[in-house]
Amino acid sequence: MTSPGELERTLRSQLRGEVDFGAAARALTTMDASNYRRVPAGVVAPRDAGDVAAALRICADAGFPVVPRGGGTSIAGQATGVGVVLDLTRHMNALVSVDPVARTAVVQPGLVLDRLRDAVRPYGLAFGPDPSTHARCTLGGMIGNNACGAHSVAWGTTADNVTELAVTAYGGSSYRLGTGWAGAPEGLRELVAGNLAVLRTGLSGGFSRRISGYGGLDALLPERGVGVARAFCGSEGTLGVVTEAVVRLVEAPRAPVLAVLGYADESAAADAAAGLLGAGPLTVEGMARDLVPGAAAAGPLPRGDAWLFVEMRDEGAARSLVRGADAVDSLLVTDPAGQRALWRIREDAAGTATRTPDGGMAWPGWEDCAVPPARLGAYLREFRALLAAHGLRGTPYGHFGEGCVHVRIDFDLVTPAGIARFRSFSGELADLVVSHGGSLSGEHGDGQARAELLPRMYGPEVIALFGAYKDVWDPAGGMNPGMLVRPARLDENLRFAALPPGGGELSHGVARCVGVAKCRTKEVGGPGVMCPSYRATGEELHSTRGRARLLHEMLAGEVVTDGWRSREVAEALDLCLSCKGCRSDCPVGVDMAAYKAEFLHHHWSGRIRPPAHYLLGGLPRLLRTVALLRAAAPLNAAARRLPPPGLTRDRPLPPLARTPFTRWWRSRAGASSASAAGASSASPAFEARVRAEPGSGKGRGGESRPQGPGATAVTLWPDTFTEYLSPHTGRAAVRVLEAAGLEVTVPRGPVCCGLTYVSTGRLDRARTVLRRTLTRLEGAPDRPVVVLEPSCAAALRTDLPALLPDDPRAHRLAAAVRTFAEALEQYAPHWRPPRLDRPVAGQTHCHQHAVLGDAADRRLRERAGLTGELSGGCCGLAGNFGFEPGHHAVSVACAREQLLPSLDAARDSGPAILADGFSCRTQIAQLSPYRAHHLAELLADGLPIEGPADSP
């Protein structure tokens, strides 16, 4: 038998695309978005259809199975394989042509759906099927699963929107499929002719969401036009590989209107859904209150405990629908922004489904069963009862107008008892679906999760016909074996089985990654951050999911075999910016920054680290030494001539301030020009105010400027960046906080949040630094701690209690942390900030977005008359990341993706440039003609020189 090494050499010699049988490539494709894991022999990224044919011929000759793979978002296991995985996204991802008159497009299989939608939108057209993964799913994957989405009530499934397919079978034979027998494989016509009765009685008469098995085979009946291309859709890669497709486009409604209908409960909403179909809706989506955050339910949604989102083509049709609907309450939304806000509630609900109310995980496996819409209410009542009988929890939602229900269930897929319950529940649920005339899969395919149960849905003659159909296309059985026909058991190959028992938080964390690949989107716009390195490189290796997969395989030890010393994992994590965007933007809250820190901790344990880990990781101690020696000026001069060893030569180091913030604080009684000299980058107006400010402090660290009886005392945290690099920010904050009537204190002696040690994986050192900090703070009274640098505030809130979980002081300090805006809002609620009345541009810090939230900042900006939205994404500098060798190109690419264009776009309005993070301000200064300021600086500029702003 051919060995994997021989196969790899043969493929390399005959293909133009990439061939990779290495550990990293294999580890990245062991899983899709399902509960299953299969280890491939290697991965091939074909350049074109010729490469596909050659790969399928070579693999057939060698006896290696093949599985085609698009975005890897399948939830039933069909995008995993034990032979060769064909990655069709890297090269075969083109939109070949668009014919707006004929309303068709020619696409390659790796094209992401949103790219097609963006390209045809100027013609007033759209591709009808729109699964929720539209930003990363591919057309080939949609064809393989016969994907649907929210608009299928109007425009049907993918099979309804495909006219021609170019397909290559195992062994290399190529076919052009359309309507009629021309181009079909030999033997297919004869198979149909011999099974007309089975096709007419076993498959015909179903409903639109009957996706399970080869459910589209009845399209081959003569009375249905012999739709060979249509019948191929939904075959889940088990018949051949699509290399090109001609798809239909639909006319997009010019001004759709969203009607949100409220109902007493889920069953009432489900019962009502079928009755709305006669009005011709574009969507009928349903969800109940237990899937909606309380704030959202109390806000824009109408009264009720369950809702139907019904999109209509125009306002007249929507009003007519509302008048005829028997709903508790309703809401009609015509403006696009309001519609997006409501759809976001629905989309967020889909993410909520991955978590149980107590924070546990819910898993796919029974994600998309469907029943005829008229049966949906009865089905849901019995489904909820079945969950309760098995002691399981799940929250249904989905395409109520098509009877398709999404749900993730809190299965225990680790212990033998839990897996046995998963198996018994699956069988009973399959019987329940069938009893209502439904389909085990309504849009995601059966894969390994449900194929074993297909005999419960179809009779033995239909199952035999499925096997014969597979054999016509794939007599050698090499295309995605174990799926649909002669399937593996639904409780085999579970991905959790590979992880070591008791693997700790890292094992639990990487297992949480269900692979829906939200981190692989390249959508621009909105506040989202995840995943900047993937957006810059386009490589799965540098996505949050890719890194989680590699860590999963590192812990499993089968593919990645050198554990914490793994070069593959180190390479993947090297371009992780530790932005923490995944902590908030990932549906399951994967925190890759924390996993990277733990990996680096183990990876470099007992070894000499890279110089950057000592220079930048130990930055607080290094800069404190420089300040004690009063060596900022000579060090700045030296850095201008030659950057320190181990750091990139592609960017200058930011200059050190001559007067650290706490030195200025201690010498406030003098309030001299010397204290202002270290803040040369502050605005002239602010510097003038600093020089004019009367000194009234007692001149000792830990003491405050008196603000009168009853003033709330807050501690201003002198983080490393504010202390040594941006002390003018600290001085501005003092001025604003005191103007608001707060009594400001500063800790005695150096304190540190440990961030730089955490980000370089020096966790033991971080714990030592944090314990020392807590000891220094023990004598200080309990009071709010205002942290100006968002990354430091996030570290104190999350990393501190995680690193010192048994120290009650750590939890007290974490709970006391406030951002600058939070402190003003909470402790000076009646203070009126100065009216600046100007537009603002800039960026919300990644850690603020992911950990702290920016609601208070938005409200403060509004009260100060700062209008406009800040950019999403990541600045790309990310603390030490942008200064480390090999990172400059990615760092700049991240900035150019959203931040820098947003500044250029706002230039004509003369905005104030706002960035609370020191890294963000540095990146803006080094890559653009703009200079950014902390919010404290902008507000300080607006204060009158003579004293605090008036209170109402």
Image: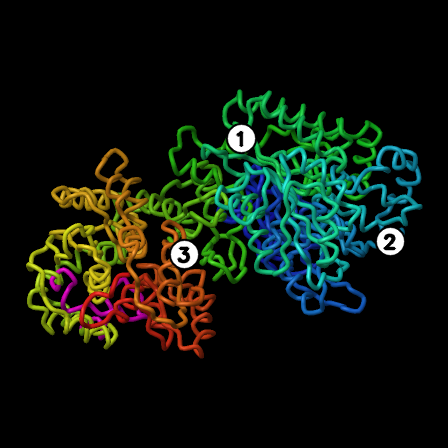
Q: CA distance from mark 3 to mark 2?
A: 48 Å
Q: Quadrant of the C terminus?
A: bottom left
Give the residue at x 72% y 44%.
Answer: 325
Give the residue at x 56% y 46%.
Answer: 516
> For the residue labelled by badge 3, is the local secondary structure a helix, a strand or a loop?
loop
Look at discs 1 and 3 and give the one toward the viewer.
1
Q: Quadrant of the N terminus?
A: top right
Whether residue 753 sits left or right of residue 561 in the image: it is: left
> For the residue labelled by badge 2, is the local secondary structure a helix, a strand or a loop?
loop
The answer to which of marks 1 and 2 sits earlier in the sequence is: 2
> For the residue labelled by badge 1, is the local secondary structure a helix, a strand or a loop?
loop
In the rendered image, residue 646, in percent from the top left (x then y), is placed at: 27, 62
The answer to which of marks 3 and 2 sits earlier in the sequence is: 2
Q: Quadrant of residue 404?
A: top right
Residue type pointed to by label 2: Thr
Closer to us: 485 or 819: 819
Residue 643 colored magenta? yes
Closer to us: 504 or 51: 504
Q: Which residue is mark 3?
A: 575
Residue type pointed to by label 3: Leu
Magenta part of the protein: which range? 638-664
Asked if labels 2 and 3 touch by Cβ distance under 8 angstroms, the answer is no
